[in-house]
Amino acid sequence: MAAANDDSMWNADAVAAFLGGVSRRHFLERIACKPGFPTPYQLSRKVKLWYPSEVKDWVKRNRINQAA
């Protein structure tokens, strides 16, 4: 769920930028379809929007430990 005081949503470009600048295509084809990734709000047939708080929570849960 989105925070009560933040009703803004991110489109695929914004989510891709947040995820480190991956391409929109990479995000949609390789990340957004992963099980457990937040379900988007389908604004139209082509437009999907995500709550930033849900995306951030997913990132926190799915960080890869890169400590060597």
Image: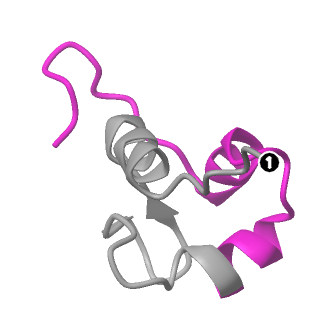
In this view, 24 is above or below 28: above
Q: How is the image coloured?
A: one colour
The part of the image, by quadrant, that contains residue 8 is: top left
Few, some or many C-alpha atoms within 10 Å of disc 1 (few <14, some 14-19, many ≥20)? few
Is 15 on the left-hand or right-hand side of 26? left
In this view, 49 is above or below 9: below
Residue 29 in picture, x, y percent from top left? 68, 86
Residue 21 in picture, x, y percent from top left? 85, 47
Which residue is depicted at the point 60% across and 75% down? 31
Q: Quadrant location of the N terminus?
A: top left
Q: Nearer the viewer, residue 4 or 56?
A: 56
Residue 65 in picture, x, y percent from top left? 62, 51
Which residue is depicted at the point 80% across and 48% down? 68
The part of the image, by quadrant, that contains residue 64 is: bottom right
Residue matched to label 1: 68
Q: Give the farthest residue toward the top.
A: 5
Question: Residue 22: within the magenta?
Answer: yes
Is 21 on the left-hand or right-hand side of 2? right
Q: Give the magenta-colored segment's residue range.
A: 1-29
Is 68 on the left-hand or right-hand side of 36? right
Which residue is depicted at the point 39% across and 69% down? 37
Q: Nearer the viewer, residue 29 or 67?
A: 67
